[in-house]
Image (cartoon, rainbow, N blue to C red):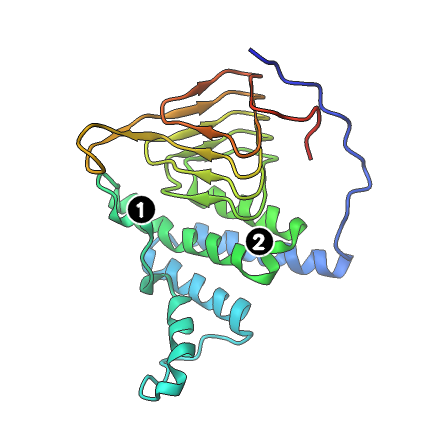
Amino acid sequence: MATNPKPQPVASNQPHPTPEAEEVYRRWIRFLDEEFYRHRSPERRAEIVRDQLYQLYLGRPHGGKPNVTLSSELPGNVLGMSLDPENVTLEAEYFSGIDEAEFAIRKPLLWFWKMFDRSPIGLNLWLGMRFRCMLGRHIFDHMGSGVKIHQGVDLTYGYKLSVGDGAVIHQGVLLHDRGGITIGKNAVIGSFVRIFSHSYGNEGNDDVRLQPTKIGDGALIGSHEIIMGGANIGAGQVVGHYPAYKV
């Protein structure tokens, strides 16, 4: 079994936004955090997310009902309506065994997560990491401190996901937490890793077997690796190729 290579020290002069931009970013994240703590109903959360996405994508506040009679305006109407979580469906909603109540309060936030990452500002590393950690506190079963989540991480349920202190999840990772995924403290998940927590029996797609998956403390999962449902990656274990440092 491979063990965790010693990380190289991280430089103290990390890239940073301007003080003015940092203040605006922090205010926005703090505002959203307070709103999602204050409002747990799916309907109110959907309204909050809709209003935020309207400004991120269209540069204007949500302004009532669109004119749906003109064919020339249909593409714009499709875009505007799709910014509202109540008008979209997600793959997880089609799965058997979903906890509908737990998913309902998270669905607007899952849509916010996906659409933020697909917006131009989703590429803003400093802002994006802080935004995702804030949102993760309202989505995940557990979100530790000092977690870093890069762009394009895809979630399934969210409420069956636990992420420990100091964990790093790189870009493009799939966390298919249908059966539950636990990522330990200071674990590092490389880019485009696929982590599953279920498998299929002999009866096809309807024969789903939920198998919780655990990534131990300090484990390193190399880029593009696939972790199958039920795997138990030990503390400090290295799966695949991983360099002797983390970013």
- For the residue labelled by badge 2, is the local secondary structure a helix, a strand or a loop? helix
User: Can you identify the residue that label 1 sits on?
Assistant: 92
Residue farthest to the top, as pictured: 1
User: Can you identify the residue that label 2 sits on?
Assistant: 30
- For the residue labelled by badge 1, is the local secondary structure a helix, a strand or a loop? helix
- The percent position of residue 12, horizontal first and vertical second, equals 81, 37
Residue in view at x 54 percent, y 47 percent: 132
Could you tell me how far apart the alpha carbons at marks 2 and 1 are, in whole angstroms? 29 Å
Q: Nearer the viewer, mark 2 or mark 1?
A: 1
| Mark 2 burial class by Cα count in 10 Å: few <14, some 14-19, many 20+ | few
**Residue 238 appearing in the image:** yes
Image position of 20 (left or right of 201): right
Viewer-proximal residue among 205 and 178:
205
Question: Is residue 161 shown above or below 33?
Answer: above
Label 2 or label 1, whichever comes before in sequence order = 2
Q: Can you say which quadrant of the picture contains the C terminus?
A: top right
Image position of 144 (left or right of 81): right
